[in-house]
Amino acid sequence: MDYSTLKSVLEGLLFVSGDEGISAKTAAEVVETDVDVVKDVLKDLQKELSKKNRGIRLTEVAGGYRLTTVTEHAPYFEKLAYSPTRSALSQAALETLAIIAYRQPITRIEIEEIRGVKAERPLHNLVNKDLIEEKGRADALGRPILYGTTKAFLDYFGLASIQSLPEPSAFDDDDELEERTKLLFDRIEGRQLSMEDLDKQLDTE
């Protein structure tokens, strides 16, 4: 692998690793290259991003590397996060929200076990939109955060209380989660299905 390609691949690895970042050792194993070479390329990429005044930076944290934004740009990110035009929820966020609504209080790890993919980004977005919040800490190793829905969640979906949600048969399979997510999505899209309609639709399918 030539130098340019290696740098490009490493940048991609940093992107997909998200907030967790990636260690030079792990990156070296993935690209099958000496760890010192990987460190040199990452340092070069770090300097390049800074020198060209790019909107992202490469930061070394606790022995790992991850992409971050420029601190001075924070006010713009906050405006984007709270912009009315950003009110729509992604499929990943809806799935995560459906799990939390029916299984709360629940930890990130438990959510990821149900969805089969990482939930860190959807959780971050849902917290920013005030649809979920920290409900305490689980009595488990590391004392992970327990998540639950907020009053804003009830307002968002027009619910009197969390008990107004359709009775779930428990998320025993992907079809149930997919159906619950679809029903939440339909409600957001303006079809204004009542909770009675939701239950009837589930009973007939």
Image (cartoon, rainbow, N blue to C red):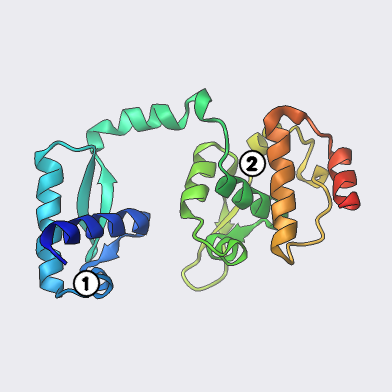
x and y percent of residue 110 in the render? 59, 65
Q: Are marks 1 and 2 in contact (CB under 8 Å)?
A: no
From this view, report whether residue 172 is shown above or below residue 123: below
Using the rendered view, name the quadrant where residue 60 is placed: bottom left
The residue furthest front is 1
| Circle 2 residue | 150
> Residue drawn at (24%, 55%), measured in percent from left and top?
11
How far from the left and from the top, in percent, is residue 197? 87, 39
Sooner in the amino-acid sequence: mark 1 or mark 2: 1
Type of the residue with mark 1? Ala
70 or 137, which is in the foreground?
70
Q: Relative to residue 63, is residue 176 drawn left or right?
A: right
Disc 1: which residue: 28
Q: Dot 2 lies on which element?
A: loop
Does the image show residue 148?
no
* Marks 1, 2: nearer the viewer: 1
Q: Please tell me in which quadrant of the rendered image residue 6 appears.
A: bottom left
- Which of these two is toward me, 26 or 134? 26
Q: Is residue 15 visible?
A: yes
| x and y, in percent, of residue 45 in the image | 14, 52
Disc 2 marks a residue whose amino acid type is Thr
Position of residue 132 measured from the top left corner of the image (x, y, whole percent):
59, 45
Residue drawn at point x = 78 percent, y = 40 percent? 161
Please, what secondary structure does the residue beneath circle 1 have?
Answer: helix
Residue pictured at 84% horizontal, 34% vertical: 194
Asked if residue 15 is positioned above or below residue 29 in the image, the reply reads above
* Label 2 environment density (alpha carbons within 10 Å; few <14, some 14–19, many ≥20): some
**How far apart are labels 1 and 2 at the CA level?**
43 Å
Q: Is residue 84 left or right of residue 197?
A: left
In which quadrant of the rendered image does the N terminus lie?
A: bottom left
Q: Count neighbours of disc 1 (C-alpha within 10 A) and say few if under 14, some if 14 to 19, many if 20 or more.
A: some
- The residue positioned 57% from the left and 69% from the top of the image is 139
